[in-house]
């Protein structure tokens, strides 16, 4: 399962998005989640196609957020579902075994439901306070993360406020990997950010 996932947000990039992702992959990231919620079909497909090229070249996974059609069209490795998306069970009927299915979970109930309905992995968070979830959901915290990872067989990737200072605590709490937006998107040297998190 993914050890270090780059989650995109082109509006926060210190460098152009494609360059940011390319450098992060050079630094050791092994997965990229395309998460540009404001883009419509053709724009999202075009961006996904470019990301598919560079993730393939880096032997890394491409995950498409929410859009099963785009994930299938670009031959992504996984589709990632949120609370407004179809259920993993419904998506599995559409994609058979072509895609892994990830689910964002903010509670133990959501995590259990993801496992019961056929998710491949879960993105749990926010672990720490983060601008992307401010006012939407409360931070999970390390103690809850440790309890939840013990209560599921799903691989759990921690997200939310992940930095080079705290990522080891997330792994120690039972996560198999970490995902980050700001740590990569805002970095002037995304390769160095990835190396620090993979060290």
Image: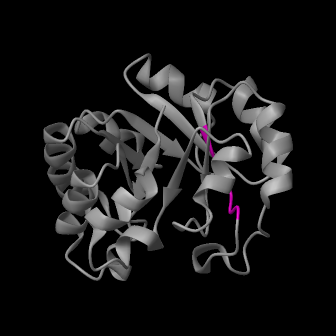
Residue lying farthest to the top in this orientation:
97
Rendered view: 2 above or below 40: above
Asked if residue 46 lies left or right of residue 31, the reply is: left
Residue depicted at x 43% and y 16%: 97
- Image quarter for residue 42? bottom left
Asked if residue 94 lies left or right of residue 107, the reply is: left
Asked if residue 101 lies left or right of residue 115, the reply is: left
Asked if residue 102 lies left or right of residue 174, the reply is: left
Residue 127 image position (x, y, % from top left): 70, 61
Asked if residue 84 shows in the view, the reply is: no
Residue 121 image position (x, y, % from top left): 59, 33
Residue 141 image position (x, y, % from top left): 79, 61
Q: Could you tell me how many numbered marks the image carries?
A: 0
Q: Which colour scheme is used?
A: one colour
Magenta segment includes 31: no
Residue depicted at x 67% and y 52%: 170
Residue lying farthest to the front in this orientation:
199
The front one of 5 and 37 is: 5
Rendered view: 123 above or below 127: above
Residue depicted at x 19% and y 58%: 22
- Image quarter for residue 172? top right
Asked if residue 72 shows in the view, the reply is: yes
Residue 17 image position (x, y, % from top left): 24, 70
Residue depicted at x 76% and y 39%: 111
- Image quarter for residue 135? bottom right
Please give the range of residues in magenta: 122-127
Rendered view: 169 above or below 3: below
């Amino acid at each position: 399962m993914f050890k270090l996932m780059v989650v995109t947000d082109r509006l926060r990039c210190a460098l152009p998005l494609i360059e940011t992702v390319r450098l992060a992959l050079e630094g050791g990231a092994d997965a990229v989640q395309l998460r540009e919620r404001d883009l419509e079909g053709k724009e999202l497909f075009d961006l996904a196609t470019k990301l598919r090229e560079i993730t393939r070249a880096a032997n890394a996974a491409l995950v498409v957020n929410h859009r099963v059609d785009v994930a299938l069209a670009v031959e992504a490795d996984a589709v990632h579902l949120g609370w407004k998306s179809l259920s993993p069970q419904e998506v599995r009927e559409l994609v058979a075994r072509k895609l892994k299915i990830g689910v964002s979970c903010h509670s133990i109930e959501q995590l259990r439901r993801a496992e019961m309905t056929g998710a491949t992995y879960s993105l749990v968070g926010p672990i720490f306070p983060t601008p992307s979830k401010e006012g939407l959901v409360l931070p999970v915290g390390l103690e809850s993360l440790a309890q939840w990872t013990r209560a599921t067989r799903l691989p759990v990737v921690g997200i939310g406020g992940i930095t080079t200072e705290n990522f080891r605590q997330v792994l120690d709490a039972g996560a198999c990997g970490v995902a980050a937006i700001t740590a990569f998107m805002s970095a002037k040297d995304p390769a160095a950010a990835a190396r620090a998190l993979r060290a």
